[in-house]
Image (cartoon, helix red, strand yellow):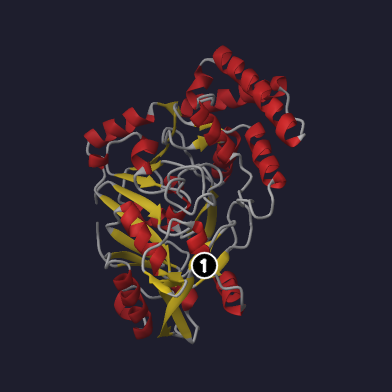
Amino acid sequence: MSNIVIVGAQWGDEGKAKVVDYLTEFCDLIVRYQGGANAGHTVIVKGEKFVFHLVPSGIVYPAKICVVGSGVVFDAEQFLKEIDELAGRGVDVTGRLFVSDCAHLVFPFHRQMDGAAETSASSDNKIGTTGRGIGPAYSDKALRCGIRVGDLTDWDYFAQKLSQSCAQHSRLLETYYSVKMTDTAEALCERYRAIRARLLPFITDTSQFIYASLYKGKQILFEGAQGSMLDIDHGTYPFVTSSNTIAGGACTGAGVGPTMIRAVVGIVKAYTTRVGNGPFPTELSDSVGETLRKKGGEFGATTGRPRRCGWFDSVVLRKSVELNGLTHLALTKLDVLSNFSEVKICSHYEVDGKRLEHFPSNLQVLGRAKPIYETLPGWNDDLTACKSLGQLPTNAITFINRLQKLCHGIPLLMVSVGPERSQTIEVTSL
């Protein structure tokens, strides 16, 4: 093993948590480097389902150390809720879970701002956010008026900053959205006084902690949230998230140099899904799309919203390979494609009668893109008990090989044939 970054190679919801869970066995530290409680990472271990929003999903492994990095916008109440849920299920995090003192806090008024902005937007301009306050919290960070986790170590300083931030956001809510702020500054200070007492043991300089671990030869796994096509700089802007989801974000979001990363694994579903608004060339608004949604359990772990479903889009994957410098692919949910008479892969787009091989950054062009498919024979076999590639049906292997070839021939690390940790075919090693 080497220090690796795990990224979603599509629009998110690719099954990153399962891959992180699978690879955690071979790593010492698991570091979440961006996003916030808008992420939903689901792990199933021996039939038991765990859903994480902020705590790195590797925490279910005993003795593994997990870190929430500085690039995350941190909802302290959600974090403590997850800690309590883990404790109730016998998972002790004492001494093995840390939060960066440089991570920015998400407050209730951020969530209120998020909801008000989305509600007031016209139907064409709605982003489809989770309403978790992510965008407003990142906005405060960029405006240099945010409050960081480390500020909690000095209560008087924190309380003063929180009172100022409450006044600022109260004015914004009333001026722009004609909405009164739900919480008073006094009430929030009281809530966060109790939160502070519980959170202090988790707060540390995680960048230094990670570097010291690297120096000792520890293996690090950097875990992203969302997907590459939701990256704030390189995704389908403005229908994106508010942080850098691609592999480069691991360096800034964890506080490590690029020379410390040795491999980048892109998680890719055997079909394509998207949550929220924005262009989606291979979307299927028919019975096939509905079948994929039902068989794949394609409902958001954070919001419960049904995901938009479509055939595999290799144009998206080629863009993701280039953005992330992918060294390996991890293919998930291959089992969902069983019992289709035929399966399809989008090989390229057609725009205004012209062939387009590369994913366009112009949304007007992307909106006119017609997916051009290659049709392959399907299979009826149940894949969930397969333990090697040789046990897969011939047509499934043909599908995998064609998918790889269309995605710059990036080697496969693993293939997931079911939700359980054990339902994983290892193809190569890192």
Residue at (50, 57) in percent of width and height: 363
Badge 1 amino acid:
Arg
Give the side of residue 156 with respect to residue 56, left or right: right
- Assign the C terminus to one quadrant of the image: bottom left
Q: Is residue 382 visible?
A: no
Q: Position of residue 301 (x, y in %)?
A: 58, 55
Compare residues 267 and 252 and report the one nearer the observer.
252
The vertical placement of 96 against 278, above or below, is above
Q: Position of residue 213 (x, y in %)?
A: 28, 34
Give the side of residue 36 with respect to residue 359, left or right: right
Q: Position of residue 231 (x, y in %)?
A: 45, 49
The vertical placement of 281 against 81, above or below, is below
Residue at (45, 26) in percent of width and height: 101
**Number of dots carrying numbers:** 1
Give the side of residue 360 with respect to residue 289, left or right: left
Residue neighbourhood size for the residue with mark 1, other residues' Cα within 10 Å, grouped as few (<14), some (14–19), many (≥20): some
The vertical placement of 96 against 19, above or below, is above
Residue at (45, 41) in percent of width and height: 34
Q: Position of residue 161 (x, y in %)?
A: 58, 18
Residue 244, quarter of picture: top left
Residue at (54, 44) in percent of width and height: 86
The vertical placement of 384 against 47, above or below, is below
- Would you name the residue on which mark 1 appears? 368
Which residue occupies the extreme top position in the image?
A: 156
Q: Secondary structure at mark 1?
A: loop
Give the side of residue 411 with respect to residue 242, left or right: left
Q: Is residue 141 visible?
A: yes
